[in-house]
Image (spheres, rainbow, N blue to C red):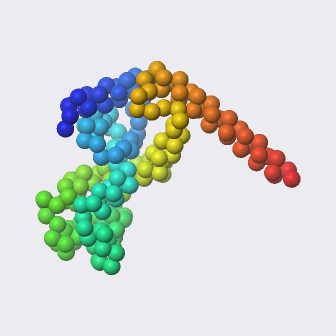
Amino acid sequence: MDVAIEETFTWLFKQWLQCMHGKVPGTIITDMDVAMRNAIKNVFPNTCHRFFSWHITKHLVEHVPAMREADGDFPKDYYRWYNTGDIDECEMEWRRLCLKYKIDENDWLSKMWELRIHWVPAYWKGTFTAGMTSSQRSESMNAFFDGFVNQKTSLRDFVDQYEKALADRRRKETQEDFKSKIQRRQ
């Protein structure tokens, strides 16, 4: 892991915290980046850090060949485990899955089990996420900023572009509100 990247995330989160007058987020949902995870743990130790389910599914298909077998039992057993309602049931189903499919500590899925609090729904109970569990919201935000910022945008330009993006969003919403009111009257 690159220490400089972790330090950059730590700096960024501290700046964000300062801008938010010390108010920490209740939940943060990210990809599985180790440097970001460490920085979140350092700066926001009491914040629930979750992983986007899309990233897990993507890696699951890459690392667990049985997930690609549509006619096999593994996908069905996996989703039964993944969708369990509580932690005790989840852990019991995990042991069953490990025994049935001979999952050992060297398997990618077993390593992901160690990170289960970040991505397995049974461990999310009572955590507010505003319905954000996949990259759909992230992709929506990416689309929101398309045309306004890119990798080379400076922080100062980002703030300017962010304001332009918000103004554009407000203008479009106002137009849609107007259209909706006109259509209701007709």
Q: Quadrant of residue 85?
A: bottom left
Whether residue 123 appears in this view of the structure is no
Residue 26, image x, y percentages: 40, 39
Q: Quadrant of the N terminus?
A: top left
Residue at horizontal 29 percent and vertical 56 percent from the top: 59
Residue 48, image x, y percentages: 35, 43
Q: Residue furthest bottom?
A: 71
Front residue of 35/168: it is 168
Classify residue 15 as left or right of residue 131: left
Residue at horizontal 56 percent and vertical 27 percent from the top: 163
Whether residue 108 appears in this view of the structure is yes
Classify residue 182 as left or right of residue 38: right
Residue 172, image x, y percentages: 67, 39
Q: Residue furthest top?
A: 156
Front residue of 85/164: it is 164
When the figure is inspected, residue 173 is found, relative to residue 76, above or below; the finding is: above
Front residue of 156/24: it is 156
Residue at horizontal 24 percent and vertical 60 percent from the top: 63
Residue 3, image x, y percentages: 20, 31
When the figure is inspected, residue 3 is found, relative to residue 77, above or below; the finding is: above
Front residue of 35/157: it is 157
Classify residue 170 as left or right of residue 139: right
Q: Quadrant of residue 21?
A: top left
Residue at horizontal 38 percent and vertical 50 percent from the top: 52
